[in-house]
Image (tube, rainbow, N blue to C red):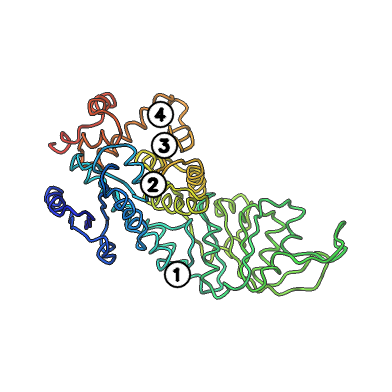
Amino acid sequence: MICHFVDSRTDFVNILAEKLGPDFTLEPASPDDRKQLTSCDVIVVALPSQEHPDYASCLSRLQLIARNPMGVPVVASLASPERQLALTAMMAGAYDHFFEIGSMDELRVVLRRAAQFYEMNRELQRLRVSGLELSDFVSIIGCDAKMRAIFSFASKVASTDATVLLTGETGTGKEVLAKAIHEASPRSRQPFVAVACSSLPETLIEAELFGHEKGAFTGATAARRGRFEAAERGTIFLDEIGELSPGLQVKLLRVLQERTFERLGSNQPRQIEARVICATNRNLSELVKPGLFRADLYYRLNTIELNLPPLRERRDDVALLAHSFLQSYAQKHKRAVTRISRAAMAALQEYDWPGNVRELQNVIERAVVISDGPEIVMEQLPSQFAAWDMDNESCSFEDEVRGFKKRLIQRTLTDTNNNKLQAARTLKIARSSLHRLIEELQIENPERKTAA
């Protein structure tokens, strides 16, 4: 890890570099050499106490460097442990801070955390700019192997006119992927028309899809184009296709086979030029067995199938998605929040996400809106994050809280390389309290495990 330190005390920086250890390369940097400053993982900027004659100029320097175009995170090195000084540094744009009189372990954790944040941001940019060649969507980004395979396959499918069936639980991003396929296709300049099949009553959906002529039914005072016509040469997305009635299934099969349809009240066939992408959160093959879904239609739709895995099966993407949504909503709602606390992130990664990516998106937006500082904390997450297994009726509230504490402490010990002093500081509890909780919660001693 390469860190550049902006401080006139060269000897102090050199001593600090020796104490940090071989995993860190800490080098003095000039505040005027922008190329040097941004060619690193973390920038450290010294901020003296408010009584120091250079305080104002150092604060201005911190504000300027924190806005560096490469987005390299800035960590403030504070001369005194004053709360107001730390708050000022964070408001100036610092990602994090440490006190010069603090421990080296604390400094290492702060630098690692900032470097991980920078790496995550670079990964987001890489995915947006060149990862898929699809579009700049964020709801289905991910580094999980399953998602990368889906992205790769989707990019190949996009250039064709093949009918695509998207499957997966509600909230996994099926419509977003459908839009991405459309945007990456030669049809991208044409309309993208989405139809939620489950939200329309059976008496209206046929007219909604295929249109109607004047006088076709009571209230049809004028001819009207349906969604297939509105899509023109673009893409029509039929969401929740498994909810279609048997009668409409027959008509859709004919549309897909003959590429023609008729408006209600008309015998004049009309040509379909739009590409068809369908989606469902139901298992169509299981619906075929009892006759709830036509087998011939299923096989027609199943030419290209992409299954989006639920978020609980790709937990490594939770942090990536959460930070992406954080950036988007902080900008949208004009909030200064820039990061998620260790405890809050642990809760997000432990949660099962029954609502998948859409639920995560809503949780982050809510937290950003009610945030009053630079960091999302546990108190800003919904109440369900205090417990993970609400479906287990035999599990009491006390058991859920106990389980959360145990997981949080285990994760923190892992992040701090089993350094209990640093773990206690991260959790903001006394070291004696941490030892008591480890004993009380029966957390296996990491040293004993290593020795075994």
Q: CA distance from mark 1 to mark 3?
A: 36 Å
* Badge 1 or badge 3: first in the primary sequence: 1
Which residue does the image show at 52% across and 46% down from the upper left? 362
Quadrant into which the C terminus falls: top left
Q: Is residue 75 above or below residue 255?
A: above
Residues under numbered marks 4 and 1 in contact, where contact means CB atoms less than 8 Å apart:
no
Indicate which label's residue lies in the foreground, 1 or 2. 2
Task: State the mark number for residue 91.
Answer: 2
Near-viewer residue (377 or 252): 377
Residue 16 vs residue 32: left or right?
left
Residues under numbered marks 2 and 4 in contact, where contact means CB atoms less than 8 Å apart:
no
Q: CA distance from mark 2 to mark 4?
A: 36 Å
Considering the numbered disc 3 on the image, is that residue within a helix, a strand or a loop? helix
Q: Which residue is mark 1?
A: 133
Please state which amino acid type lies under the numbered disc 1.
Glu
Please state which amino acid type lies under the numbered disc 3.
Met
Near-viewer residue (164 or 159): 159
Q: CA distance from mark 3 to mark 4?
A: 15 Å
Please state which amino acid type lies under the numbered disc 4.
Glu
Percent position (x, y) of residue 104? 18, 43
* Circle 3 crowding by C-alpha within 10 Å: few under 14, some 14–19, many from 20: many
Which residue does the image show at 51% across and 44% down from the upper left? 369
Percent position (x, y) of residue 211? 76, 64
* Badge 4 or badge 1: first in the primary sequence: 1
Considering the numbered disc 2 on the image, is that residue within a helix, a strand or a loop? helix
* Badge 2 or badge 4: first in the primary sequence: 2
Percent position (x, y) of residue 357? 48, 50
Q: CA distance from mark 1 to mark 2?
A: 37 Å
Q: Which residue is mark 3?
A: 378
